[in-house]
Amino acid sequence: MKAAPALDVERIRKDFPILQEQVNGHPLVYLDSAATSQKPISVIRAISDYYLHANANVHRGVHALGERATEIFEQARRDVARFVSAEERGVIFVRNTTEGLNLVAQAYARPRFGPQDRIVATIMEHHSNLVPWQQVREQTGCQLEFIGITDEGRLDWEDVERLLRAPTRLLAVTHVSNVLGTINPIQELVRLAHSEGITVCVDGAQAVPHMPVSISDLGADFYAFSGHKMLGPTGVGVLWGRPELLEEMPPFLTGGSMISVVQLDHTTWDEVPHKFEAGTPDIAGAAGLSAAISYLEGLGMDAVRRHEEELADYAIEVLSEVRGLTQYGPRGSDRAGVLSFNLDGVHPHDVGTILDREGVAVRAGHHCCQPLMGRLQVAATARASFGVYNQPQSVAVLASALGLVSKIFA
Ligand SMILES: Cc1ncc(COP(=O)(O)O)c(C=O)c1O
């Protein structure tokens, strides 16, 4: 007997108004969720409801709307903490993953590291988890080294063992690669790193939206992710930091909302996490993020993961039959719903453009991973990435549109 589908995708699709769009005369087949996800109507409504019924600034109003806005914002913090099983005091609202990682680079690494220290990252990092560490190297003179990958697209464990030794101070690693789909063994990496006294900063942008994530089980010291990739709005993201470390760190941005007492010659900081939330935050974004979390919790993250794993397996199988198509990334259970590929003799931008004519949205380019492109010996790839609203049929449409690309370039 066939197992029941992990998700009722027909029903889910009704919650995403944008999926009714026609693109170039075709029904939209959205396969670019790794860039940003689409939003269910509940998220869109939570944002408009906030502006319709609760708009005010947070943490300062003595009036009713101020209290409502503060409650919505702080509820979002509790929702995030529950969703990723992490201590609430460590949840800092930022704009996106990029800002969260820059916060760690500038407020944790920069003040502590010097020429004798080493940061280790991997060559599969998104530029967001690479360029901030290059900046720290410029600013402090510290060393920056990289763990390579195997031909299958997994971390090279010899490099891991070699580099995770003193004097390494920080490991910066992605949980899931946005190009290869590789799910890195974060728990194991953290165990190894911590046994050497190394702090671990994880880029969770492609993990939190697609699988159950428990930051406390992973044991990471810092963990960043973006609301917009997890069915939530753009403009809000999260950095979770171990509260003991956050306590010791200077603020990243300064100004209003993050202070305790300001005098002309001296200022003291508010408590963690508020010390890291300077200025008016994205309150509407937090309302939307709460709704996105409720939506994902309603589906169940185990089911979301199973659904996307099945889609990825199916896509790998179907696309293997497209002549001249090379796929990147590992085969196995350590693989998320991201599939990068190239067609012989066709530039990925041409692939993307022709697919778009058929209503299929994929991403083409270096995916903000230029060093990884170098390792794969390509300038760019096309990439299909899946979400809760994709069906096997979406993969079938992709495959037949790729057949058309091959025919055009034959
Ligand atoms: C693995 C990974 N890290 C970081 C980012 C950056 O996310 P954001 O642009 O939301 O800061 C992305 C976005 O594509 C990503 O895929």
Image (tube, rainbow, N blue to C red):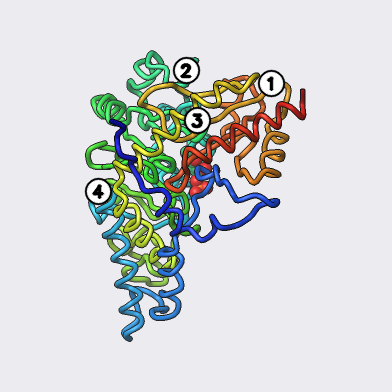
Instruction: Kindly indicate whether the residue at mark 1 contacts the one at mark 4 (C-beta within 8 angstroms).
Output: no
Mark 3 lies on a secondary structure that is: helix
Instruction: Kindly indicate whether the residue at mark 4 contacts the one at mark 3 (C-beta within 8 angstroms).
Output: no
Residue in the image at 71% along x and 26% along y: 406
Residue in the image at 53% along x and 23% along y: 328
Label whose residue precedes the other's in the sequence (3 or 4): 4
Amino acid type indicated by mark 3: Ala
Determine if residue 135 is in view: no
As drawn, the label of residue 322 is none
Q: Nearer the viewer, mark 3 or mark 1?
A: 3
Determine if residue 41 is in view: yes
Q: Position of residue 344 (x, y in %)?
A: 69, 21
Q: Which residue is mark 2?
A: 152
Q: How far is disc 1 from disc 2 in space, using C-alphas?
A: 19 Å
Q: Which residue is mark 1?
A: 344
Q: How far is disc 3 from disc 2 in space, using C-alphas?
A: 17 Å
Mark 4 lies on a secondary structure that is: loop
Mark 1 lies on a secondary structure that is: loop
Q: Which residue is mark 4?
A: 86
Instruction: Kindly indicate whether the residue at mark 1 contacts the one at mark 3 (C-beta within 8 angstroms).
Output: no
Q: Nearer the viewer, residue 334 or 74?
A: 334
Label whose residue precedes the other's in the sequence (4 or 1): 4
Amino acid type indicated by mark 1: Asp
